[in-house]
Amino acid sequence: MTGGRTRARYQLAIEALVSTTPRGRNGGFGLMPEHQRICDLCVEVKSLAEIAALMRMPLGVARVMVGDMAEAGLIAVHQSNTTEGKPDLALLERVLIGLRNL
Amino acid sequence: MDFATSSPPERTAGPTTSVKIVVAGGFGVGKTTFVGAVSEINPLTTEAVMTAASDGIDDLSKVPDKTTTTVAMDFGRVSLDRELILYLFGTPGQNRFWFMWDDLTRGAIGAVVLVDTRRLADCFSAIDYFEDAGLPYIVALNCFDGTLSHAVDDVREALSIPSDVPIVTCDARSRESTKLTLIRLVEHAMSRFAAMR
């Protein structure tokens, strides 16, 4: 499934959001079954962790697959706005407002 | 004009930003209960397979294949606005799976260390980890039966928690209580952020 690789080319955060691109939606018959399932799953946005859990595959395997699929243009990966790897103040404020409005 | 003058660079449906908070604490302290109380989905479980050298990590003699072991963690999801999702990750039950913690804490807002006051020592390793990592955290005393066997000040002293780290009480089963705990953590992370400028 991962071509023997266990390390993704780039380190996706476990909370990174993944959505299926129009190309992924129209993937048709050429896709590997797992890729097709991930494309189906991410029509509604999912995190890497959700993909791993729902596909019942280890996190590392899901990470490699998602990296490959992003490179093939089947899915888009949205990483968050961070400053030196941490959420910035504007993002924290949004989180705070969101929590208070729950 | 009938159409918008500006359009997003890429057409995307739904949320595009995510953040995470880590929920740590000893085995059986109520991490999954805490996550489930506020999550909009039933907590999911994701697994990581560890294949590296594992001496001292776990009792692998009970595992048929002695070179691998699986670490599971539960997580939940909270939509905060149309474009923003918060994920809550419970740490694996065994505190010694540090390789998993690095993955969990990278880029996190911070951590809630859930404490059962009857078993204070269970959270030592989590607190040490977050202190070393410089990750903002707060300590939440989970009140199972509405009463606390230790006063907050006693807990601070017993666990040597720095005076600037908030200690709150919470009921991990209550949505309102877990929500307030998360708000306290985000406020703490923001004050830490401001202080570092």
Image (spheres, helix red, strand yellow):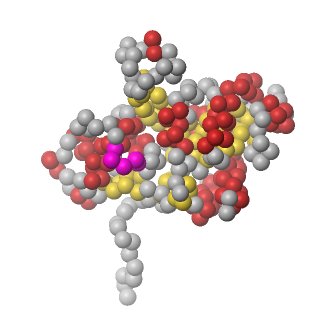
Side of B41 relative to A28 (left or right): right
User: x, y (%) of residue B102?
Assistant: 52, 40
- The residue lying at 52 percent from left, 54 percent from top is A85
Q: Nearer the viewer, residue B165 or A99?
A: B165
A69 sits left or right of B104 in the view: left
**How far across and how far down the image is residue B19, in percent?**
53, 52
- Residue at image point 42% right, 14% down: B63
Measured as percent of width and height from the top left, residue B161 is found at 76, 38
Q: The C terminus of chain B appears in which quarter of the rendering?
A: bottom right
Is residue A20 or residue B64 the one in the foreground? B64
> What residue lies at 50% left-to-right and 15% top-to-bottom?
B59
Q: In the orientation shown, which residue stands out farthest toward the top?
A: B61
Examine the residues drawn in magenta and state their main secondary structure. loop
Q: Quadrant where the N terminus of chain B lies?
A: bottom left
Q: Is residue A40 visible?
A: no
Q: What is the magenta range?
A: A8-12
Q: Is residue B81 above or below residue B55?
A: below
Residue A61 drawn at (x, y percent): 33, 37
Q: How many marks?
A: 0
Q: Residue at x 35, y 66 (%)?
A: B11
Determine if residue A10 is in view. yes
Is B20 inside the magenta-drawn segment? no
The picture quadrant where one finds residue B24 is top right
Q: Quadrant of residue A5?
A: top left
Q: Nearer the viewer, residue B166 or B164?
A: B164
Viewer-proximal residue, A76 or B126?
B126
Work out which residue is located at the far left of the displayed protein and give it.
Answer: A29
B12 relative position to B126: left or right: left
